[in-house]
Each structure stands twice: as C-alpha cells, then as structure tokens.
Amino acid sequence: MTLGGTPAPGAEPGAAFECDRLVKSFHGREVVHGLSLSVPRGSMFGLVGPNGAGKTTTLSMATGLLRPDAGTARILGADVWADPSAAKALMGVAPDGMRLFEQLSGRELLEYVGALRRMPRATAAQRTAELLDVLGLAGDSDVVVADYSAGMVKKIALATALIHAPRVLVLDEPFEAVDPVSGQTIRTILRRFVEGGGTVIMSSHVMELVEGLCDRVAVIVDGRVRAAGTLEELRGDKTLHERFLELVGASDAGVGGLTWLDS
C-alpha cells in the first residue's frame, strides 16, 4: 500500500487543505466566526485549542461531515461541498466519537469501507490484512467492533481512513485512549505517510504530543484562528504548552476556593 502519493493534475501546488471564512451557528449562536486556514502539502499539522473552541466543528465542515453556514473548504483544490466526490476521494477522515458500523467485525468493516471506496475486492482484502497486522488488531479481526475497547476503536477508525491510500488525512484526537505501544506505531505510520508525500491534519489536547510530532500548528480560540505557523514560529523561546496558555489567556488566578483541599 502506497502512503501519501503524488499531486493530482490541476491541484494547487502549495495547499493540501484550505478553509476560507467558514461560519457555523448552533441554535442561533455562532461558534465558528469566518475561520480561514491553509495547510501546505507535506505538512504534519496540529490543530489545538481549549474545549469548545471549534476545532471539531471546523474539521467536520472541512471534510463534508457538517455543512457550513458560509465559507468554503478545499482538499488539494477540490471543493468539499461543490465537488464532494472528488474531495472525499483524496482524503481519509477519522472523526472523534463518530459511530462506525459496530456490528461488523474489524475485518468486515475494513473490507466494507474498501467496497464503498470502489476498491477491487482483492486489494481491499490485502490492505485490510496489512492494516490489522500493523495496528495490532489481527488477533481481534473477527471480533465485532462493538466489543472493541476505546483504543481499539481509535485504531480501526484510523485503518478505515487509510485503506484507500488517501493523500490527506484528517484525524480528530487520534491518540486518545491509545496505549503507548500503539501510539508509537501510529506515529510511525503518520511520519511515513508524510514522507511519502501525504499531509496530516490532526487535532489534539496534548501539547507535548503535537510538539513532538507536528511541524506546523494552529491555535483555535472561540471559533477563530488565534495563531498559526511553523512550530518554531509559534512557540518562540517557550514550550508549545507555555505558548498555548499565553494565547488562550489561561492562568491559575481563577482557581480559588476549595480550601477544604488544603492540608
């Protein structure tokens, strides 16, 4: 299975993933405010922000899972909403918490996704076996996904995003609930994917993970991009964790009361 790939004819040379002035409201309250973001091809891009900042909503709009109220999103030049078939053929998506076909076994799920992607049956079966083996799921390949642990669900979701050898991966909290050994395997897969010409966009709350894996980062706060750039540009002479706390205005000053915890 080839990870990454070469650019499609006519694709914009520098951008793998673009959001332009995305807007989304829920129940009359705007939560994403004209958000624009561009991710260069070949990047390992980290998207960070506090809970409720709009990261998942933005990724959902940018990948065709949630229709924006305004704005556009493109994958390698293909408009996600004007030409969804072309855009979705180029990307693999593993949203956080999205329900899978849980009554299928791991093997059945991957082969079914391969069929949905119109892959030859033999190719889908071969890639399914490879992915299950590499991700440590071969021994549970005939277990229904409903019986998988949270970490196993994360891994099978990543496998569904990879099976058609996309050129852009969009992952929402891909390391959550994953054990350290599996986490290292996923890091290796993602690095190989980027080295092969692919692009990864991943959200995470773990600053140390983003700092150790990503070369570019964007910080989203209150539905807007507060800062974006290379890891070095964003953190300066601080750690990413320290810079993040500065950007979101976090401090210990609001932690009052709870005197009964003091001893």
Image (cartoon, rainbow, N blue to C red):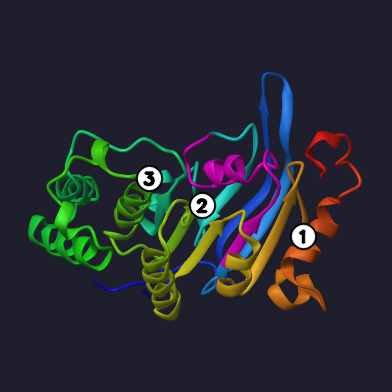
How many neighbours does mark 2 have within 10 angstroms: few (below 14), some (14-19), or many (20 or more)? many
Residue occupied by mark 2: 173
Q: Earlier in the sequence, mark 1 or mark 2?
A: 2
Dot 3 surroundings within 10 Å: few (below 14), some, or many (20 or more)? Answer: few
Q: Nearer the viewer, mark 1 or mark 3?
A: 3
Q: Is residue 191 shown in magenta?
A: no
Report the side of 217 relative to 261 (left or right): left
Reply above or below: 186 against 58: below
Counting from the top left corner in percent of width and height, residue 217 is at: 67, 65
Q: Find numbered disc 1 in the image and state the secondary structure of the residue it sits on.
A: helix
**Residue annotated with mark 1:** 244
- Range shown magenta: 45-66
Distance in Å between CA atoms under marks 2 and 3: 12 Å
Is 157 on the left-hand or right-hand side of 120?
A: right
Residue extending furthest toward the right = 253
Mark sitting on residue 150: 3
Q: Amino acid at mark 2?
A: Glu
Classify residue 235 as left or right of residue 184. right
Circle 2: element type: loop
**Residue positioned 20% across, 52% down in the render:** 114
The N terminus lies in quadrant: bottom left
**195 is higher (above) or lower (below) than 21:** below
